[in-house]
Image (cartoon, rainbow, N blue to C red):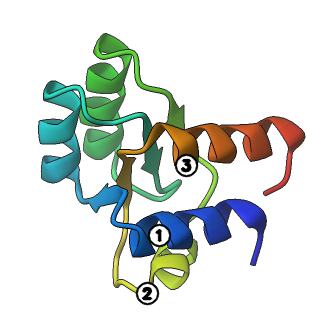
Amino acid sequence: MNKILNLLGLAKKARKLVLGTDTSVAMLKSNKLTLLVIATDASDSTYDKLEKKAYFYQVPVMYKFTTEELSNALGVNQVKVIGITDAGFASAILKEVERGDF
């Protein structure tokens, strides 16, 4: 498993992430998200809804993994949207993205 998926698993264990579209939107609106992760195979309506909100609230969005990859990393079925609530985890994940380690 790569470093980004490992970091997502650690964030889940540390309770520093939320799962699902509706929960992520609510957290975006309350300025509690530092990174949004959307599965590459999520629906177009999910992309549209979350991209606009993330842009408005100036939260970076990452599209790198499929639903299956995210689900396996977190041990949860059908994970399409993950909201990272901790700046440290978000920063570490974005650094790995910049390094191209995914």
Please state the horizontal and vertical placement of residue 38, each as a whole percent of the image.
Answer: 44, 49
Residue 75 circle label: 2
**Residue 46 vs residue 12, the one in the foreground:** 12
Q: Amino acid at mark 2?
A: Gly
**In terms of secondary structure, where does tag 3 sit?**
helix
Q: Amino acid at mark 1?
A: Thr
Q: Amino acid at mark 3?
A: Phe
- At 23% from the left and 26% from the top, the residue drawn is 31
Q: Are marks 1 and 3 in contact (CB under 8 Å)?
A: no
Disc number lying in front (2 or 1): 2
- At 41% from the left and 34% from the top, the residue drawn is 34
According to the picture, the residue beneath numbered tag 1 turns out to be 67
Can you tell which quarter of the image residue 80 is in? Answer: bottom left
Please state the horizontal and vertical placement of residue 81, each as a whole percent of the image.
Answer: 35, 55
- At 42% from the left and 44% from the top, the residue drawn is 86
According to the picture, the residue beneath numbered tag 3 turns out to be 89
Residue 87 lies, with reference to residue 12, above or below; the image says: above
Please state the horizontal and vertical placement of residue 65, each as a whole percent of the image.
Answer: 60, 60
- At 64% from the left and 51% from the top, the residue drawn is 64
User: Where does the C terminus fall, quadrant-wise?
Assistant: bottom right
- Alpha carbon separation for disc pair 2 and 1: 12 Å
Closer to the chain start, of discs 2 and 3, is 2
- Alpha carbon separation for disc pair 2 and 3: 18 Å
**In terms of secondary structure, where does tag 1 sit?**
helix
